[in-house]
Amino acid sequence: MKRTVIITFFALMGCIHAFSQNHPKQDEAPVFVPDSLGKYELGINTYFAFDRWMDQSIRSPFEILLRRKIKTDRMLRLRVYGNLSRSRKVEFTTTDMDRLGKYGLAIGHEWLKAINRKWQWYYGLELEGSQDRRHILHERMGWDAATDISFWEKRDNYHHIDRLALSPLAGIRFSLSPRLLFSTEFRLVSSLGRQRITIEDSTKALDEGARYQLQSTGGHTIKENGIRFQPYTGIFLNYRF
C-alpha cells in the first residue's frame, strides 16, 4: 500500500506541475539534454531500499538499467537484475532450508516525449529472458517401526523456471539536475515459461560419517504462460555521462 501511495504521488506531482505553468507554449516545446552531457544514462532501482524500509521480510532484487541515446528522442536500453536469498530454520531434529537464485536480462527501445523543462514521459518495448533456481530442503529424524532403527531422512525439492517475455512499457522522468534524474515505469508482461520440478527422497544412518543414499526421485514440468500487469517497478535514480 505504501509503495502504491509513493508511486501515485510521484506521478500526480508531475501532472500538476506540467499543467500549472504560466507559459504553456514555452513549456510545451520539446526540451532535450544536449549531447555534451553524454549519451548514456546509468540507473539503479531504489526499491530494494524502499521495500526493506516498508517491509523487513521482503528480499528485493538488485536492478541496473543502462540507456544509450541514439536520436534526440530515442534511446536503447539494457536492464540487468538478480536476487539471491537463503533461509534456514532448525527445530530439535528438524531442519528446513530454502535457497533462491534469480537473474534476468532485458533489451529494449524507448521513445521520449517532453512535458516541460523538468518532466518527460516515455514509452517503449522490452524483450526479457530470466531464470529462477530454487532448492527447498526438509530434513528430519525418521524411525522404522519394523526394525526399531532410527535414521536421517530428507526431501529435496528443486524448482527450475525459464521464462521469455515481451513487455510494452511506459514511464515518467523528472530531472533533478542536468545529470541526475528520477524515473519510474509500468509494464505489461506477456511471457512464455516452463517450470521443472524435481523431488528426491534420501536416507542415511545415524553413524558419524554416513552419507545420504537416494531412495526415490520424481518430477514433472509445468507451462507458465500468461500476461501480467506491473504497475509498480520501483524508482530509478539515473546519472547521465
Image (cartoon, helix red, strand yellow):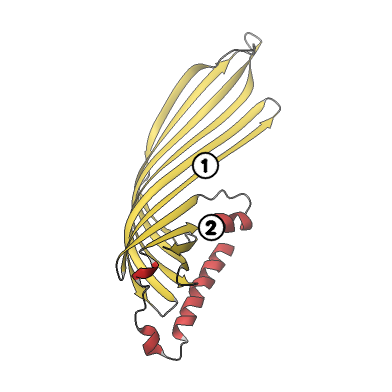
102 lies left or right of 167: right
Marks 1/2 in contact by CB < 8 Å: the verdict is no
- Image x and y of residue 32, in percent: 36, 75
- Circle 2: residue type: Tyr
At horizontal 43% and vertical 44% (from top left) the residue drawn is 103
Of all residues, the one furthest to the right in this rendering is: 92
Is residue 175 placed above or below 201 in the rendered structure? below
- Image x and y of residue 51, in percent: 58, 56
Mark identifier at residue 213? none
Is residue 221 placed above or below 93 in the rendered structure? below
Whichever of labels 1 and 2 marks the residue nearer the N terminus, that label is: 2
The C terminus, quarter of image: bottom left
Image quadrant in which you'd find residue 231: bottom left
- Image x and y of residue 169, in percent: 37, 63
Q: Label 1, on which residue?
A: 84
Is residue 142 placed above or below 32 in the rendered structure? above
Image quadrant in which you'd find residue 188: bottom left
**Tag 2: Cα neighbours inside 10 Å, few (<14), some, or many (≥20)?**
some
Q: Label 2, on which residue?
A: 47
- Circle 1: residue type: Leu
Of all residues, the one furthest to the front in this rendering is: 36
Residue 1 seen by the camera: no
- Image x and y of residue 98, in percent: 56, 36
At horizontal 46% and vertical 72% (from top left) the residue drawn is 174
- Nearer-the-camera pick, 236 or 135: 236
